[in-house]
Amino acid sequence: MRENMNKNYVMMWVAIFILTAISIFNIYGYYSLNEKIHGISGKFYILNTSSNTTEKRTNESILFPVERSIPIVAVSSDGEGVVGNLIVKLIPGNNNVLINTNPFLETDIQYSANKAVAVAKLRSNYNYDKDFILDFKAGDARLIGGESAGAAIAIATIAALENKPLKNEAVITGTINPDGTIGRVGGIIEKAKAVADAGYRYFLVPKGQSVVTYYERQLVREPFGFGFEILNMRYVPKRVDLKKIAKEEWGLNIVEVSTIEEALPYFIGD
């Protein structure tokens, strides 16, 4: 009888120990799971914790990436001006500049893009929590010069960072410098004709490039001696007031700009 009671007593304590161990395991598992979920949530949302507003905007950009589109103009390998398109997309990231191209780009595009994005970030209130994706499309052009698209990249990036719409009346060509100044480019005449044919009102060019110097091939008679003459091919410099020609013949307004600040009103409203 006593032996049976001792066995029952031992079995009861064994059962209590097992139930206690199971309860402790469940409680630990619950808190451990919550901690993991909280950690994942923190990694997902902690892109910027400076304010609730910034966090809300960051979360919205995760679901809805910010995009801005701006026209660009290039000169094809055939020597013709071609109007294309650049899309700047902002996504949550680590401050990378990524490039998607069609067609091929010259090797200087990455350097130019980095400079343009840097200028845009300095001007805007940027929190270093995004990646920048640049998507170039230029129709029939086989090759795009990266430097000449620098000003356009900067403007589109500023519009995206400041969440402002872009107008659709102007095209710009020009390199971009770290201080925001716009540098000289080539192919101004070909680009102006393409911009006019595409129906835009304004074509913004670097300061001093509305008057273009080109070289016209001419046959020149030159004395050879003993009363003879020979014909020599010469390239004679000619200066063209592109602003006047573009307005009279194409209805296009050529505007010279020195800095990105001078160009912005043609693309971004108040």
Image (cartoon, rainbow, N blue to C red):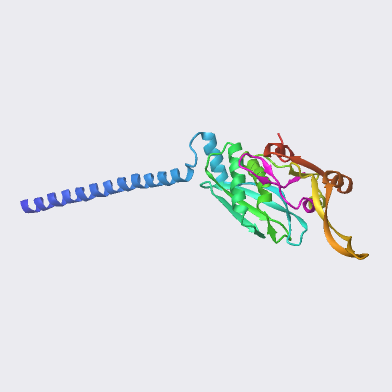
Q: Position of residue 164 (x, y in %)?
A: 66, 39
- In the image, residue 181 lies in the stretch drawn in magenta: yes
Asked where in the image residue 216 lies, by quadrant, the reply is bottom right
Q: What segment is highlighted magenta in the picture?
A: 169-191
- In the image, residue 222 lies in the stretch drawn in magenta: no
Instruction: Say if residue 168 shows up in the picture.
Output: no
132 and 229: which is toward the camera: 229
157 and 91: which is toward the camera: 157
Vertical comparison of 181 with 189: above or below? above
Asked where in the image residue 217 lies, by quadrant, the reply is bottom right
Farthest front residue? 226
Q: Position of residue 225 (x, y in %)?
A: 89, 64
The residue under the point 54% across, 45% down is 130
The residue under the point 40% across, 45% down is 39
Q: Position of residue 103 (x, y in %)?
A: 67, 60
Asked where in the image residue 178 lies, by quadrant, the reply is top right
